[in-house]
Amino acid sequence: MTATRGLEGVVATTSSISSIIDDTLTYAGYDIDDLAENASFEEVIYLLWHGNLPTQAQLDELKSQLAENADLPKEVLDHFKTYPIDQVHPMAALRSAVSLLGLYDSEADVMTEESNYQKAIRLQAKMPAIVAAFARVRKGLEPVAPNKNLGFAANFLYMLNDKEPEAIAVEAIDKALVLHADHELNASTFTARVCVATLSDVYSGVTAAIGALKGPLHGGANEAVMKMLTEIGTLENVEPAIRSKMDNKEKIMGFGHRVYRQGDPRAKHLREMSKKLTELTGEPHWYEMSTKIESIVTGEKNLPPNVDFYSASVYHSLGIDHDLFTPIFAVSRVSGWLAHILEQYANNRLIRPRADYTGPGMQKYIPVEQRG
Ligand SMILES: CC(=O)SCCNC(=O)CCNC(=O)[C@H](O)C(C)(C)COP(=O)(O)OP(=O)(O)OC[C@H]1O[C@@H](n2cnc3c(N)ncnc32)[C@H](O)[C@@H]1OP(=O)(O)O
Ligand SMILES: O=C([O-])CC(=O)C(=O)O
C-alpha cells in the first residue's frame, strides 16, 4: 500500500453537486461566472439541493421557509452569555452553537429523507442568526431578531448591525455567498461526508465541517489575509514585507490551491468588488496593497490568489469584524455541506480508507516493572 500525501488527486466519491474541470467551477452545470453575475444566494441554495434552478414559486417557498426558520432557540442565545467571551473565536462559538441546536431539535436523529431536508432548511436559516447574535452578545449588545421581510443576505447584515443595510452591502454579501457556496470535495465538505457516512446525524456532519473550515489552510485564510494586510499597513511596505516572507519560505495567505493551477475563477469577482468597495469607503489602499501582493506572488512564484484573498478587503470594507470573515464563509458553505450530506445519505457507503503503517515492527509486551 502506498499513501498519497494529502489524498492529492484521489477521487473519493461521485457527486453531481459541483465540479472543477480545467479550472472551471460549476454548480450543477452552471458556470460560477454566470451565477456570480446573475443568481441570488437563495437560488444557489435551491440549485445545490435540487440540481436545478427554482421556478418563481419554488424560490418563494424556499425564501419563506428560510425566513420562518431564522429564529434561534432561547437556549442557544443564553448559552453565548456563558462563554469566556475574550478567548472564544466566533468559529468556535458557531461550532458549539450548531452542536447545541441539535440538542433542541426533536428530529435530530430521524433519518428519513424528508426529515433531513427539513433539518437542512432549519440549519441554513439559523446559521446567519448564530453568527450575528454571537457577534453582538460578545460586545454586550442584545441579539437582533430576524426581519422576515428581508432576503437572506440583507437579513444577515440587519441582524449583525441592527439597521437595514445599504443596497451595495447587500449586493456584496449576496455575491460573496454565491461564490463560497460549494466547491467539490474540499476539506470541510469531505469532513462532513465522512462524518455522516457513518449514518451520524446532520448536526454532527455540519459541526465537524465547521471545525475543518476553521483552519488557516482552508476557510480561516480570509481572516489571516486581513491580519497580513493590517501588519503590512502601507503600499510602500508591501514589497519588502512580501519578499521577506517569500525568502523565509512563509506561506502567503490567500494564495495557492490544491486543485486550481491557472487561478481560482472566484477571485476575480471578489477583486472587482474589493476595488469598488474600497473606493467607496475612501480606503483604496487595501485594494492597492492586495493587487501589489498579487503581482509579486503570482509573478514570482506562479501562485494565483484564491477565493480567500480579496474577500478579506471586501468584508473589511463592509465594516465587518475580521474574526467574522470565516463564519461568513460558513454561512454560505453550509449550503454545500448540506447538499453533500443529503447526497451522501442518498447513496451511502462508509468512508474508510487505509493507512500505510510506518511505525515499529512487531513488539513483545514487557510488564512495566521489567521495562528499562
Ligand atoms: C477556501 C480555501 O480553502 S482556499 C485555500 C486557502 N488557504 C490559503 O490561502 C493558505 C495558503 N495556501 C496554502 O497553504 C496552500 O496553497 C494550500 C493549503 C491552499 C494548498 O496546499 P497544497 O496543495 O498541499 O500545496 P503545497 O502546500 O504542497 O504547496 C506546493 C508548493 O507551493 C508552495 N506554496 C503553496 N501555497 C503557498 C503560499 N500560499 N505561499 C507560499 N508558497 C506556497 C509550497 O510551499 C510548496 O512549495 P515547495 O514545493 O517548494 O515545497
Ligand atoms: O477546494 C478547496 O480545496 C478549497 C476551496 O477553495 C474551497 O473550499 O472553496
Image: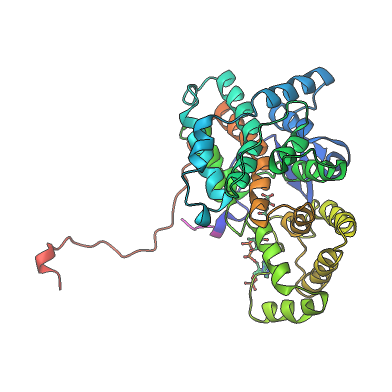
Q: Residue at x 71, y 41 (%)?
A: 181
- Image quarter for ligand 1 equals bottom right
Q: Residue at coordinates 75% horizontally, 42% vertically from top-left?
A: 177
Left or right: residue 358 versus residue 91 is left
Magenta segment:
1-5
Please tell me whether residue 370 belongs to the stretch shown in magenta: no
Q: Is residue 120 above or below residue 303?
A: above
**Residue 78 shown left or right of residue 137 in the figure:** left
SS assignment for the magenta stretch, majority: loop
Examine the rendering and report whether any part of residue 349 can be seen: no
Residue 275 in view: yes
Q: Nearer the viewer, residue 121 or 303?
A: 121
The residue at 52%/35% (across/down) is: 76
User: The C terminus lies in which quarter of the figure?
Assistant: bottom left
| Residue 156 position by quadrant | top right
Question: Depth check: 221 or 198 in front?
Answer: 221
Q: Position of residue 109 (x, y in %)?
A: 46, 25
